[in-house]
Image (cartoon, rainbow, N blue to C red):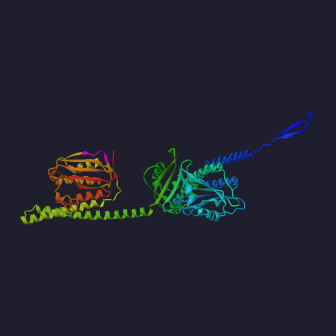
């Protein structure tokens, strides 16, 4: 600042100048501008990370360390990620100023244990400022050697941490000269470290997702089963696995370009099954049907639908797992045909044998109409009993040949009990039921079970007047109890009554009962008290019983 000087006549004769040192103010202004610029940069970096697509995460990290490195006027900036087991660090991202040699290839699998002093600071969440590597403490000898090896003269290391977990380290290095950083620089770089930690978490999650996706894609594409994904809006086939071409001969492109090709390929007799599959994508069941191959032959497949829902519960797509069951179906049809032929042969042989049995019984009846001495009459009695057993056993083969010949299905139990009582045309025994409208999944010969149990009560119960049939839930299935008020079963016979041939009659009735029940995993046991009546318990396994 200058002030004018005047002489006695008022003429300008000089000036008084005052000078003020504003170096500190300029320095402070520069620091403020630098802080403001760094804050803007941090804000910009934060903005880059918002709504960032997973595939651009690495690019965003590269951009961030380049911007920071340029602003801080360092020679190299980098990011190290710590391994999940905390045994080593890997240099994953690096930026170098012009003329500075890259070190990223040399700084892979860096053992953490060898840099114990520095890692202790980082894990504790402390930023490390090293203006001159010569100033490192004595205990940091390994760290000093590490910096010397890579020509680093000054460095600042910032923990990349979130929720108390250190994921990595962000470093800024100089190799041409030493330099220092202000407290403001350290504070703002710590903020950046937290931002980068969030990004590393997203990168780690994305990498896990990609790894899982690659694993499952490999599983799907190498599987002999086929997988198809169909979107709902717009309706389109989004994915067809390579095995579909092996199965049908059609390429994935042909199916994607012509969505109606799938339905047109379904056998006309199986179209309703296919339509049910389309209507019920969430149904927990399998849908078998035939599809037409490109070579004009039909092949059997079994499809399991797996619905995919959006967060709001909307159905957005359906994944279809398609299993080739053609060989199984061919074997099934061959078995059915073989059983048909065996049944036909058994029927013919049984018919012929029963005809001869009828002839023998007829001749025995004619002989018994004549006067016979006691020995001959006794012999005829034994012969007739033997022939009656032969007839019973031959008739048993008619029931046994149908065992398992038809697929199991659901049967309400009460009508079967009623039908058994009507078939035996008995009136002296009262049937009482309390079955709670239970249905069981069983072989179609289930009605024979209750017929034989009732016949067993009539034949062996002697004093039976009432049969009570009840059902209760049991371990996810059911327990059906058949009990009478007859003489019961001797204790020494309880374990043998289900053996083939055991008993005072044919010994086949209860054996057949056990065999029929076992087809769908049911079992039967006798738990009655001798002298108080027989009690049979049919145990229905989980999933094979339902109460209305």
In the rendered image, is residue 408 in sight? yes
Q: Residue 3, relative to residue 51: is it above or below? A: above
Give residue 392's position: percent from left, percent from top.
Answer: 21, 60
Left-right relation of 177 to 463: right
Region in magenta: 433-438
Q: Quarter holding the N terminus? A: top right
- Residue 449 coordinates in the image, percent (x, y): 26, 54
Q: Is residue 103 left or right of residue 86?
A: right
- The image shows residue 428 at horizontal and vertical percentages of 17, 47
The quarter holding residue 90 reads bottom right
Q: Is residue 221 magenta?
A: no
Task: Pick whichever, 534 or 381, lies toward us.
Answer: 534
Between residue 430 and residue 37, name the one nearer to us. Answer: 37
Total label count?
0
Residue 437 lies within the magenta run? yes
What residue is shown at x 45% (from left), y 62% (from top)? 326
Q: Is residue 239 visible?
A: no
| Residue at position x 27%, y 50% in the image | 480
Q: Residue furthest left?
A: 373
């Amino acid at each position: 600042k200058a002030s004018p000087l005047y002489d006695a006549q008022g003429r300008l004769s000089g000036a008084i100048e005052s000078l003020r040192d504003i170096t500190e103010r300029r320095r402070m202004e520069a620091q403020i501008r630098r802080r403001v610029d760094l804050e803007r940069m941090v804000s910009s970096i934060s903005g880059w990370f918002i709504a960032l697509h997973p595939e651009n995460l690495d690019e965003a990290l590269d951009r961030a360390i380049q911007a920071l490195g340029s602003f801080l006027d360092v020679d190299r900036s980098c990011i190290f990620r710590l391994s999940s087991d905390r045994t080593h660090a890997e240099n994953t991202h690096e930026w170098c100023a012009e003329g500075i040699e890259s070190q990223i290839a040399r700084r892979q699998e860096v053992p953490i244990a060898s840099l114990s002093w520095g890692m202790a600071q980082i894990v504790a969440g402390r930023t490390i400022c090293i203006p001159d590597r010569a100033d490192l403490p004595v205990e940091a000898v390994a760290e000093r050697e590490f910096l010397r090896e890579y020509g680093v003269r000054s460095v600042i290391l910032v923990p990349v941490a979130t929720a108390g977990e250190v994921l990595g380290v962000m470093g800024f290095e100089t190799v041409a000269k030493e330099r220092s950083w202000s407290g403001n620089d350290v504070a703002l770089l710590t903020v950046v470290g937290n931002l980068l930690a969030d990004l590393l978490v997203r990168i780690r999650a994305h990498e896990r997702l990609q790894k899982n996706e690659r694993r499952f894609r490999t599983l799907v594409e190498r599987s002999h089963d086929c997988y198809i994904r169909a979107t709902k809006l717009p309706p389109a086939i989004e994915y067809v696995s390579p095995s579909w071409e092996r199965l049908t001969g059609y390429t994935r492109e042909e199916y994607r370009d012509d969505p109606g090709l799938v339905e047109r390929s379904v056998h006309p007799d199986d179209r309703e099954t296919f339509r049910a599959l389309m209507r019920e994508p969430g149904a927990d069941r399998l849908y078998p049907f035939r599809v037409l191959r490109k070579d004009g032959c039909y092949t059997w497949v079994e499809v399991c639908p797996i619905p995919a829902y959006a967060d709001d519960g909307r159905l957005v797509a359906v994944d279809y797992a398609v299993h080739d069951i053609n060989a199984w179906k061919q074997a099934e049809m061959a078995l059915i045909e073989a059983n048909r032929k065996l049944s036909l042969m058994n029927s013919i042989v049984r018919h012929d044998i029963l005809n001869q049995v009828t002839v023998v019984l007829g001749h025995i009846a004619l002989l018994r109409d004549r006067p016979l001495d006691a020995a001959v009459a006794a012999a005829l009695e034994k012969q007739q009993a033997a022939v009656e057993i032969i007839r019973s056993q031959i008739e048993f083969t008619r029931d046994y040949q149908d065992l398992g010949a038809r697929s199991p299905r659901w049967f309400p139990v009460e009508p079967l009990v009623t039908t058994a009582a009507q078939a035996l045309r008995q009136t002296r025994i009262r049937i009482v039921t309390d079955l709670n409208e239970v249905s069981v999944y069983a072989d179609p010969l289930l009605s024979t079970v209750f017929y034989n149990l009732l016949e067993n009560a009539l034949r062996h119960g002697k004093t039976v007047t009432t049969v009570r049939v009840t059902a209760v839930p049991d371990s996810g299935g059911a327990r059906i109890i058949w009990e009478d008020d007859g003489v019961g079963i001797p204790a020494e016979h309880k374990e043998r009554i289900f053996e083939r041939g055991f008993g005072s009659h044919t010994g086949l009735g209860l054996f057949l009962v056990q065999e029929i029940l076992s087809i769908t995993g049911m079992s039967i046991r006798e738990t009655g008290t001798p002298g108080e009546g027989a009690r049979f318990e049919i145990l229905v396994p989980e999933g094979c019983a339902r109460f209305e």
